[in-house]
Image: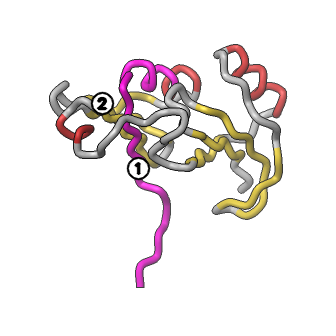
């Protein structure tokens, strides 16, 4: 039987790699781990123990995925990043200082049980849930 231990990586396709990399690095603090040549179109960012792969839709990898994502046709519903606990007002202020309008904090169920989280939207309209570590 297969038992999943954690998310290894997610892949987001985009028409603007630099803009999406800036969002995940400047706003969410992910470090660029590696970038493959432009024809491949892959940039990988470290998100804790997982990776966020960003692929240019016009690259060899990106073209394999079909149409580019839009506000009405995303690649996924949402994904959740577990973040270190902090004051909710401090997180809201940080996001707003970066031009990100956060949703409201709610208690939601996730891999560690119930805990506080909010939803934000990245520049390609992907919904990202930010969830506080509760352990």
Q: Position of residue 14 (x, y in %)?
A: 38, 31
- Figure quadrant of the N terminus: bottom left
- Note whether 134 is above or below 25 in the view shown: below
- Note whether 134 is above or below 22 in the view shown: below
Kindly report which numbered mark, 1 or 2, lies closer to the viewer in this rendering. 2
Q: Are marks 1 and 2 in contact (CB under 8 Å)?
A: no
Q: Which residues are magenta?
A: 1-23
Residue with the mark numbered 2: 56
Q: How is the image coloured?
A: secondary structure
Front-most of 106 and 16?
16
Mark 1 residue crowding within 10 angstroms, few (<14) / some (14–19) / many (20+): some
Q: Residue at x 53, y 25 (%)?
A: 123
Q: Residue at x 82, y 37 (%)?
A: 104
- Figure quadrant of the C terminus: bottom right
Residue with the mark numbered 1: 9
Quick check: is 10 in the magenta stretch?
yes
Front-most of 54 and 91?
54
User: Label 2's element?
Assistant: strand
Q: Position of residue 65 (x, y in %)?
A: 29, 45
Q: Earlier in the sequence, mark 1 or mark 2?
A: 1
- Note whether 135 is above or below 66 in the view shown: below
Q: In the picture, residue 55 is in which quadrant? A: top left
């Amino acid at each position: 039987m297969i038992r999943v231990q954690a998310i290894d990586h997610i892949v987001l396709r985009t028409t603007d790699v630099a803009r999406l990399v800036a969002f995940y690095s400047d706003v969410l603090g992910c470090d660029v781990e590696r970038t493959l040549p432009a024809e491949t179109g892959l940039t990988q960012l470290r998100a804790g123990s997982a990776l966020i792969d960003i692929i240019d839709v016009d690259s060899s990898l990106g073209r394999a995925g079909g149409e580019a994502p839009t506000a009405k046709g995303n690649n996924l519903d949402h994904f959740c990043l577990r973040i270190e606990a902090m004051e909710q007002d401090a997180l809201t202020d940080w996001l707003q200082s970066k031009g990100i309008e956060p949703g409201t904090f709610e208690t939601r169920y996730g891999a560690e049980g119930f805990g506080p989280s909010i939803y934000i939207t990245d520049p390609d309209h992907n919904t990202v849930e930010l969830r506080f570590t509760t352990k």
